[in-house]
Image: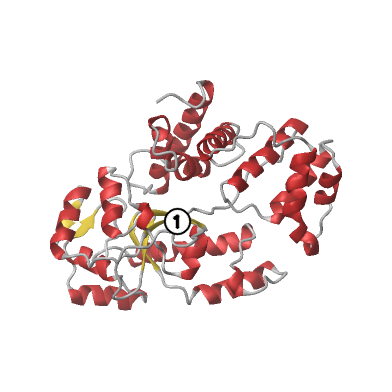
């Protein structure tokens, strides 16, 4: 078990040193009065180290919130994006936080309940792009989080660690990251203070079109489960039904495909039986590194075939392959394109369509070469 280190307050001198790393234009820092006005205007609180950082200087330019002169609409959009993304997953992807109680049958009723509960969760305040700090007044040492709907990962153990990683590429000290807000901790999949991302299973369309594709999908679901990615009962049942329609058959598969909503608790055990009955466990990688490379190839294939949005696939590769495989040079280009798409604003030279096309081209290039790809 990792015991989190006691966080140290960020000093003004340390904040000034951090400002020298990012290379953005730097306006005079926000005064205490200006910071108070921002908090009152939008209804949130800056964490203590975030206040010190902004008090030592206000970074301006692409990705940086302009808390002094920025448009209220743009700032509010950045502040509301984490909650709106969570509600999107409640509405579209079946997300539900167990502490909210039983999920209503009607989707809109579920969204209303989630909205009420989310109003009680401490805000996530944008630092740079889609990187956020929990807004809890007077506290320091919160980890910086990268947030995309309910897919949340650590980007740094605290504000200083994140900025050093983001702008110098020094490895982030994630072994000491420790989320303190229960809801965001749940999305991180935190166990005993050790961060492990627990993201949702890959969503893609169309369904498998052949028995072989259906078997591949079952194998990939098994690998995602092996990494701790949340593969819901609905996804397991859906994969079983698709396989059955495509003439894949086994006793457990027929039972899995026929489960009703009240029987979803049986899905995981039946899925494991399906894997055994169909002989799909043989040849599956067991080591984490091999699993991540296998999933990376699958995600690249989904991108190249148009089964997943290129930006979604590239972001998966950045989070679950490039980052977790110690940043292999072979995946840097597609990881950089994921960041470019995520942080895009109209002032960028490349359009979203251009970035998307580059992601697809890079996926095809990697798939055409040796695997794992050579750096």
Q: Name which quarter of the figure residue 352 lies in.
A: top left
Please indicate whether residue 173 sits to the left or right of residue 88 in the image: left
Residue 362: horizontal and vertical position, in percent?
46, 29
What residue lies at 63% left-to-right and 58% top-to-bottom?
A: 92
Does the image show residue 202? no
Q: Nearer the viewer, residue 170 or 97?
A: 170
What residue lies at 38% left-to-right and 42% top-to-bottom?
A: 340
Dot 1 falls on a residue whose secondary structure is loop
The correct choice, above or below, for 135 with respect to 173 in the image is below
Which quadrant: the N terminus? bottom left
Please indicate whether residue 263 sits to the left or right of residue 15 in the image: right
The correct choice, above or below, for 85 with respect to 288 in the image is below
What residue lies at 18% left-to-right and 60% top-to-bottom?
A: 15
Residue 373: horizontal and vertical position, in percent?
47, 26
Answer few, some or many: residues within 10 Å of disc 1's Cα (few below 14, many 20 plus, some between 14 and 19).
many
Q: Nearer the viewer, residue 155 or 280?
A: 280
The correct choice, above or below, for 314 with respect to 53 in the image is above
Task: Return the residue at label 1.
Answer: 195
């Amino acid at each position: 078990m990792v015991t989190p280190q006691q966080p140290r307050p960020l000093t003004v001198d340390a904040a000034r040193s951090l400002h020298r790393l990012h290379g953005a234009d730097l306006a005079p820092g926000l005064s205490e009065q200006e910071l108070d006005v921002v908090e009152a205007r939008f209804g949130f609180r800056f964490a203590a180290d975030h206040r010190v950082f902004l008090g030592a200087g206000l970074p301006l330019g692409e990705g940086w919130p302009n808390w002094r002169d920025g448009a209220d609409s743009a700032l509010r959009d950045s502040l509301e994006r984490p909650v709106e993304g969570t509600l999107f997953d409640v509405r579209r992807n079946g997300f539900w936080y167990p502490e909210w109680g039983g999920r209503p049958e009607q989707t809109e009723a579920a969204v209303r309940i989630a909205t009420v509960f989310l109003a009680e969760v401490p805000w996530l305040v944008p630092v740079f792009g889609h990187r956020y700090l929990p807004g809890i007044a007077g506290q320091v040492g919160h980890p910086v989080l990268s947030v995309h709907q309910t897919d949340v990962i650590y980007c740094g153990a605290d504000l200083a660690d994140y900025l050093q990683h983001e702008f110098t590429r020094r490895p982030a000290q994630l072994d000491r990251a420790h989320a303190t807000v229960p809801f965001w901790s749940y999305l991180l999949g935190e166990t005993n203070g050790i961060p492990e991302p627990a993201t949702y299973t890959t969503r893609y369309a169309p369904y498998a079109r052949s028995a072989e594709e259906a078997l591949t999908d079952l194998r990939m679901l098994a690998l995602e489960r092996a990494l701790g990615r949340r593969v819901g009962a609905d996804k397991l049942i859906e994969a079983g039904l698709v396989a059955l329609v495509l003439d894949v058959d086994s006793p457990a598969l027929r039972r899995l495909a026929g489960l009703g909503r009240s029987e979803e608790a049986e899905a995981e055990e039946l899925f494991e039986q399906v894997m055994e009955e169909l002989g799909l466990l043989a040849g599956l990688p067991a080591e984490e590194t091999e699993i991540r490379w296998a999933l990376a190839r699958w995600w690249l294939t989904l991108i190249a075939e148009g089964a997943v949005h290129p930006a979604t696939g590239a972001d998966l590769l950045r989070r679950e392959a490039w980052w977790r495989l110690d940043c292999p040079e072979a995946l840097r280009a597609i990881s950089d394109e994921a960041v470019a798409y995520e942080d895009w604003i109209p002032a960028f030279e490349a359009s979203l369509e251009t970035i998307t096309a580059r992601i697809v081209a890079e996926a095809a290039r990697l798939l055409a070469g040796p695997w794992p790809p050579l750096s």
